[in-house]
Image: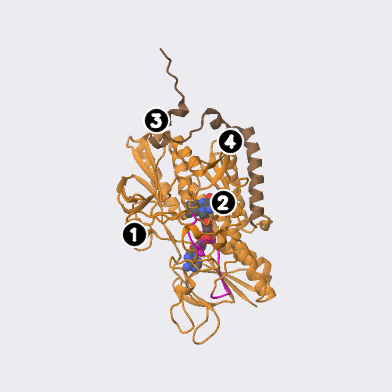
Chain colours: A orange, B brown
Amino acid sequence: MARLVVLGGGVAGHTTATFAAKWLGSAHEVVVVTPNAKWNWIPSNIWVGVGEMTKEEVTFDLAPVYAKAGITYKQAKAVSLNPEGNESSDKSFVSIEYTGQDKTGTIENLEYDYIVNATGPKLNFDATPGLGDGKGQMGNHTVSVCTADHAVHASHKLQEAIEKMKGGTRQKFLIGTGHGMCTCQGAAFEYIFNIENELRKAGVRDMADIKWISNESFLGDFGMGGIHMKVGGYVVSSKLFAESLYAERNIEWLIGAHTSKVENGKVEYELLDGSKGEEEFDFAMLIPPFAGVGIKAFAKDGSDITGTVFAPNGFMKVDANYGAGAYENWKASDWPRTYQNPTYSNMFAAGIAFAPPHLISKPMSSPNGTPINPTPPRTGMPSGIIGKAVAHSVCDLITKGDSAHLHEASMAEMGAACVASAGKGVFSGTAAAMTVYPVVPDFETFPGTGRDTDYTFGEIGLAGHWIKHILHFLFIYKAKLNPGWTLIPE
Amino acid sequence: MIEKKVVKEEANFQKSEAFSRTMIPGTFARKMRTCLIWQFIRFAIINVKMIIVVGKSH
Ligand SMILES: Cc1cc2nc3c(=O)[nH]c(=O)nc-3n(C[C@H](O)[C@H](O)[C@H](O)COP(=O)(O)OP(=O)(O)OC[C@H]3O[C@@H](n4cnc5c(N)ncnc54)[C@H](O)[C@@H]3O)c2cc1C
């Protein structure tokens, strides 16, 4: 009997574990190690952050779902990996520290035959002074929507601001990225339009100044170097699409900005031209930069091999080309296909946890040498698709042996669908529905824009809004492993 | 004397220099966003396109 250990019960890890358990049956063991007791459909945190949904509507308990699937569930976080075992055993193991199940703080060494690292991002608030509390958590000057609890807190703060406006006090809203090396601009983009919509609904829009601050060199970069799409017979840049949305809703923007410090009611920033400035706010939602979750790795003799297994940013090295060098040399083929660790073949990474070979957007820095550019997004759909491909590979390795063919899922050959809502009403809400194919531009296959413009498009309307609603219910239905769950695509 | 012609949708062009250099949808484009018949058609088209993208990605 082989044991597959999946670290992380988020979008990628949950997909890997549930498919592996289904394909392997009871002949082999699938273990999920994840510190959270609940699964969270993160995209809907946006609606929690404006008070349109409750935390309960976007989360559910993992334990009964894993029991139903025959998955061993350990509510714990991975601390370190020993891929070669230790001095007393050759067997690979991962050290985990329990965070629940009445064993909080207990350390256990869990042996594995295969391991998938799907631990997602560490929300690195402390990278920006004042954005974090200095202890790895969010500080108290800004809010976040990255977790369901953060979103609940954000919603309370929003209500307080609305009350102040109703009482006649103008409020300034600052939404965007909290560092020059952030990703996930799409989430902040969606949140700013939901805030704007909420303020209009509450009848206080004219009492609010709303501003976008981000590390993108142009509006609509989204960490993907922008996209080109067909609109009204033209092929246009997402810059025009995004600028139009902001202008229509009277939202100003500040781009090419590295948020260098956050204080009570004020951020300091540096721009791509090297100039520095300050922006005041009453309410700020700034996405933190992402890093790996900080798992260590040790060799058999106990020496630290973290730098062999993980990239400096803490994400796990996989079969990517990390030596591509300058922007001019970047190719679609630099991106990983199998997500297998190059040193330890029984180790894979899926979702945000894998180390990308380089940025997608053009690298930029200020004359002072401060890098100000979005890092590559790994959104829900690619995370799910990668998670499933990795599950397939591991199952084949277990059932067919070491020579089994590994399944492939390159981000340069897969698309992503993203729906950014603005409001939630069935007939009043609208959303920007965007589809991009492929996520990583491939200028050899699509020499003009790097992408297939038949399948890279964006439009605003109720249709996108309905799709967003359907996706919410469909993905929660699927993640709960309800009947027919395997038929719902990632 | 020329009569003043106020177009509500165009007001934001004057609110910032950056706004004045982009495009802002007019009445027709805005109406179409919530026009049920048109949005049902778009819903079908977007879904088909998304399903093709999902299919190409797996
Ligand atoms: C507000 C917001 C809105 C978004 N909206 C969209 C959207 O509309 N569409 C879209 O496609 N994407 C969206 N995304 C992105 C999407 O949520 C991510 O791409 C996706 O969650 C990544 O999946 P993952 O499994 O890699 O990471 P996660 O889903 O974050 O899962 C990581 C898991 O690992 C666990 N973990 C952490 N540390 C450890 C450890 N040491 N050991 C074990 N487990 C650990 C975590 O608790 C978590 O359960 C959004 C993101 C945010 C923040």
Find the magenta span and give its range: A343-360
Looking at the magenta stretch, what is its main secondary structure? Answer: loop
Q: Amino acid at mark 2?
A: Gly
Q: Quadrant of the N terminus of chain A?
A: bottom right
Instruction: Say which label, 4 or 2, has the lower sequence index.
Output: 4
Q: Amino acid at mark 3?
A: Gln
Q: Which disc number belongs to residue A323?
A: none
Mark 3 close to ligand 1, CB under 8 Å = no
Residue named by callout 1:
A133
The residue shown at (32%, 45%) is: A279
Image: A197 above or below A400: above
Q: Which disc number belongs to residue A232?
A: 4
Q: Which disc number belongs to residue B14?
A: 3
Does A348 appear in magenta? yes
- Share a chain, discs 1 and 3? no
- Share a chain, discs 4 and 1? yes
Question: Mark 2 and mark 3 in contact (Cβ < 8 Å)?
Answer: no
Instruction: Say which label, 4 or 1, has the lower sequence index.
Output: 1
- Please tell me whether mark 1 sits on a helix, a strand or a loop: loop
Q: Quadrant of the C terminus of chain A?
A: bottom right
Chain letter of the residue carrying label 4 = A
Residue named by callout 2:
A450
Residue A415 % position (x, y): 59, 53
The residue shown at (47%, 61%) is: A121
Instruction: Place residue A463 in its image quadrant.
Output: top right
